[in-house]
Image: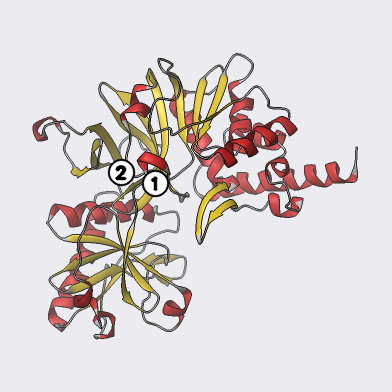
Amino acid sequence: MSVEMINSESLRRAMVDQLVADHADKGLTLRPEVEVAMRTVPRELFTPGLPPEEAYENRAIITKRRGEENISSVSAPFLIAEMLGQAADALGGLKGRHVLEVGSGGYNASLLRELVGAVGSVTTVDIDPDVTDRAVECLKAAGYDDVKVVCADAEHPVDSGRRYDLIIVTAGAWDIPPAWREQLTDDGVLVVPLRTFGMTRSWALRRAGGGLVSVSERQCGFVPVQGDGAYDVQYVDVADGVHLRLDEGQRLDSPGLDGLLETPRQEAWAGLSLPPPTVLADLDLWLASRTADVGQQFVVLTAQDAAISSGVVAPSWRFGTPAVLHEGTLAYRSELRWTGDAFDLGAYAHGPATSAAAEAAQRMVEHMRAWVNAGCPAPVLHVLPAQTPDGDLPAGTAVDKRHSRLVLAFTTEGRES
């Protein structure tokens, strides 16, 4: 055995050991078969040109860019492990299953090939011939040349008439095209990073009649879907290095935002003492749905490091913080306030009228307090065809997409995530 192989195996063991610990810190368990697969597949063979030390870092590795835009990557190990776990949990295991992966790279397909076993199958599809050519080469080098690689736009059926037990999407989607639902078996599962209100979650969705319903979700981020399913996110500058992300057709008056963050900051706090395992990604979707329910404009605030370090904003997460625009006032979920090992939730608000800004911060805090009082419920997502009448929708907050009507509800029962 060569020194390189020994070093690779050592790095792979260390990576998976860290994944086991990370899962435990999140209150999750890395499924044994997923752990075995990740200890088996040589990740460095899917990141050619990189030193093994970088291949086994717990981060995404960008494999193709178009200008400043990242359009293809090998996903971070922790996220791959979580999504494979979602799929296996929802199906009661993947052995013998037939899988379609949307978004190629090779590494995830090879892990799936290990998981489905000899009688299962894996087909991986990508719209970009550079990506599929690279996937073929990497899969062959790693000994997984029985994975079927297809170059096509997966917005449409990949193999007419064929159905799959699992469709797993490794690119950020804005909608669920009919082809994904129609290609599932009757008890099939779709695992997809889906943007809702501008925030991406990996949803495990089980087929239910003519629609889909979620059984788990995880916070995630992915390069966006290309082709006919693409949907551009819009950004509006609100200050130097601070942007509002619009993802559901919102329309903002940009001049009306000028100088908004220069007005005095008002703040409100929920007066809570929450433990670190509290799943705040669930709270963010709760805030989005409650904001939409009262007819206010929900947006996502993003900020660069310089804007935060200079005190222009102090968001809960610079890559995507829930925010509300209403009658010229902007409120957003603030950084946490820690006391010992517990934290409180707060909101900051700005506006030309001090009293209105203070009220906006207080309204957001009341939504947060309501979520905690309800037992910190997890979101449940229903996906129905676009033509579904209002009267046939389940209770919850509806979001209309091109092909689908999504309904976001919350529950404390049967939580898997």
Residue at the image position 51 percent from the left and 60 percent from the top: 67
| Mark 2 element type | strand
Q: Could you tell me residue 302's position as x and y percent?
A: 38, 67
The disc, 2 or 1, on the residue closer to the chain's N-terminal end is: 1
**Mark 1, residue position:** 201
Residue 397 lies, with reference to residue 316, above or below; the image says above
**Mark 2, residue position:** 379
| Foreground disc of the pair 2, 1 | 1
Q: Could you tell me residue 99's position as x and y percent?
A: 51, 24
Q: Could you tell me residue 41's position as x and y percent?
A: 70, 35
> Mark 2 touching mark 1, by CB under 8 A?
yes
Picture quarter containing residue 403?
top left
Q: Residues within 10 Å of mark 2 (few under 14, many from 20)?
A: many
Which image quadrant: the N terminus?
Answer: top right
> Mark 2 and mark 1: span between their CA atoms?
10 Å
User: Which one is nearer the viewer's eye here, 360 or 365?
Assistant: 360
| Mark 1 element type | strand
Q: Amino acid at mark 2?
A: Pro
User: Which one is nearer the viewer's eye here, 305 or 415?
Assistant: 305
Asked whether, in this view, residue 376 is left or right of residue 13, the answer is left
Q: Is residue 60 visible?
A: no
Q: Could you tell me residue 72's position as x and y percent?
A: 54, 47
Residue 385 lies, with reference to residue 43, above or below; the image says above
User: Which one is nearer the viewer's eye here, 112 or 132?
Assistant: 132
Q: Residues within 10 Å of mark 1 (few under 14, many from 20)?
A: many
Q: Amino acid at mark 1?
A: Arg
